[in-house]
Image: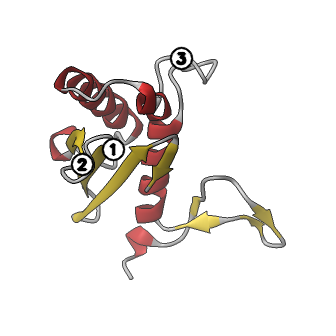
């Protein structure tokens, strides 16, 4: 394993054990940061009211192209800010749309490349009926 990916990042959510705060690798830390952006509602953080995509509320919105575009733009802006220094905004790929087999489900796919590691990753989230699967 490269020294760039050594487990020296605080894990999210924060957990304390006998050895202190739980840690994770850089790759896992970036994935944790993405989840923080996705599941934080705008206005939830006092000193960063613009932070967060608030995707949980999208479950109750009508599935259409306009919603998907606004969500994609909000994610692009928030992720570019949250991942600054780790991921070049040009390397972010965000797809938002309905599941082909289940049109009531909202699918969010995020692809990115960790600049320092030259490592590509992707994550996918499905929102349906008040549940989120990642």
Can you identify the residue that label 2 sits on? 99
x, y percentage for residue 86? 33, 49
Q: Secondary structure at mark 1?
A: loop
- Label 2 vs label 3, nearer the camera: 2
Residue 70 occupies quadrant = top left
Disc 2 crowd rating (10 Å Cα; few below 14, some 14-19, many 20+) is: some
Give the mark, 3 or 1, whose residue is nearer the N terminus: 3
Q: Residue 49, labelled with which disc? A: 3
Q: State which tag comes first along the sequence, 2 or 3.
A: 3
Q: Residue at x 60, y 23 (%)?
A: 44
Who is closer to the viewer here, 65 or 86? 65
Is there any visible trace of residue 53 in the rendered image? no
Nearest to N terminus: mark 2 or mark 1: 2
Quarter the C terminus occupies:
bottom left
Secondary structure beneath disc 3?
A: loop
> Could you tell me which residue is drawn at 32 percent across and 55 percent down?
124
The vertical placement of 110 against 6, above or below, is above
Task: Give how far apart the Cα atoms at labels 3 and 1 are.
Answer: 28 Å
Q: Nearer the viewer, residue 122 or 97?
A: 97
Indicate left or right for 126 with 109 as reference: right
Which residue in the structure is indicated by mark 1?
A: 105
Q: Residue furthest right?
A: 18
Q: Which mark's residue is nearer the viewer, 3 or 1?
A: 1
Find residue 96 and report its horizontal and vertical position in percent.
Answer: 24, 39
In percent of width and height, residue 107 lies at 29, 46
- Helix, strand or loop for disc 2: loop
Q: Nearer the viewer, residue 111 or 26?
A: 111
Figure quadrant of the N terminus: bottom left
């Amino acid at each position: 394993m490269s020294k760039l990916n050594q487990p020296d990042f605080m894990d999210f959510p924060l957990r304390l054990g006998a050895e202190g705060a739980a840690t994770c690798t850089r790759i896992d830390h970036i994935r944790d940061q993405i989840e923080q952006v996705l599941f934080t509602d705008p206005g939830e953080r006092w000193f960063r009211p613009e932070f967060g995509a608030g995707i949980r509320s999208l479950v109750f919105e009508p599935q259409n192209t306009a919603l998907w575009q606004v969500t994609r733009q909000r994610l692009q802006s928030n992720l570019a800010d949250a991942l600054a220094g780790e991921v070049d905004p040009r390397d972010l790929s965000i797809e938002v749309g309905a599941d082909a087999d289940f049109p009531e489900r909202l699918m969010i796919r995020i692809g990115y490349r960790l600049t320092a590691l030259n490592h590509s990753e992707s994550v996918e989230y499905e929102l349906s009926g008040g549940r989120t699967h990642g």
